[in-house]
Amino acid sequence: MSMRHLLAFVGVAVVVIVTPGQDTALTVRHTLASGRRAGIRTAVGVVCGQAVWALAASAGLAALLVASEPAFVAMKVAGAAYLAYLGATALLAAARRRPHGANAAPGPGPGHELRQGLLSNLGNPKMAVFFTSLLPQFGHTFPALLGLGLVFCSLTLAWLSAYAFAVARAGDLLRRPAVRRAVDALTGTALVALGVRLATTDR
């Protein structure tokens, strides 16, 4: 692969990655809830999911999923339901948040951020469509396709980690009870909306 093709791929990847979506919303929410490390764990989970999709696309397995209407629809519905669940959890947290910042119920244990990031990404079949349509434009062999996919994963990890650092630095302001409720409500609404969009839109 020429440097020109690689730079073109990176340009397309950056535009896609910096566009806010469910991965960004989850990273911001977990960073606010549990700090920078929790945000980075979310990012690692997202990237692990992307790596699975990249490997599947490089091996031709993702194309089989895209070609199978029942399998694609089933995964889309499952992914949409999971996003709606995460959104409802955030909205419930906003409703339960007390004026002085204490929650009515304890949150899940540490490490759940990575799991949520992973499942959120794996449950999005549009990643299969994205990788199977984008990667072959810049590479044709298995090593080239997988290498491009891993470049995409690395860029995603860098971007989401930067988000976690930025949100953590602004933590004193963003962790104020009123702001936390607003952020939980906003991210919850966004995740539910993304779930509805995933369930109702075509490929």
Image (cartoon, helix red, strand yellow):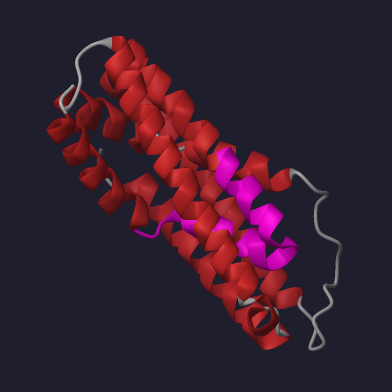
Judged from this view, the residue extending furthest toward the front is 3
The image shows residue 81 at horizontal and vertical percentages of 53, 45
Instruction: Using the image, determine if residue 58 lies above or below residue 193.
Output: above
The residue lying toward the viewer, choosing from 80 and 106, is: 106
Image check: 114 left or right of 146?
A: right
Quadrant in the picture for the C terminus: top left
Q: Is residue 159 magenta?
A: no
Q: Report if residue 183 is visible in the image.
A: yes
Q: Is residue 71 left or right of residue 144?
A: right
The residue range painted magenta reads: 19-45
124 left or right of 83 in image? left
Residue 31: image location, x then y, percent: 65, 62
Q: Residue at x 45, y 53 (%)?
A: 159
Vertical side of 71 occupied by 174: above or below: below
Q: Could you say which quadrant of the image residue 165 lies in?
A: bottom right
**Residue 156, picture quadrant:** top left
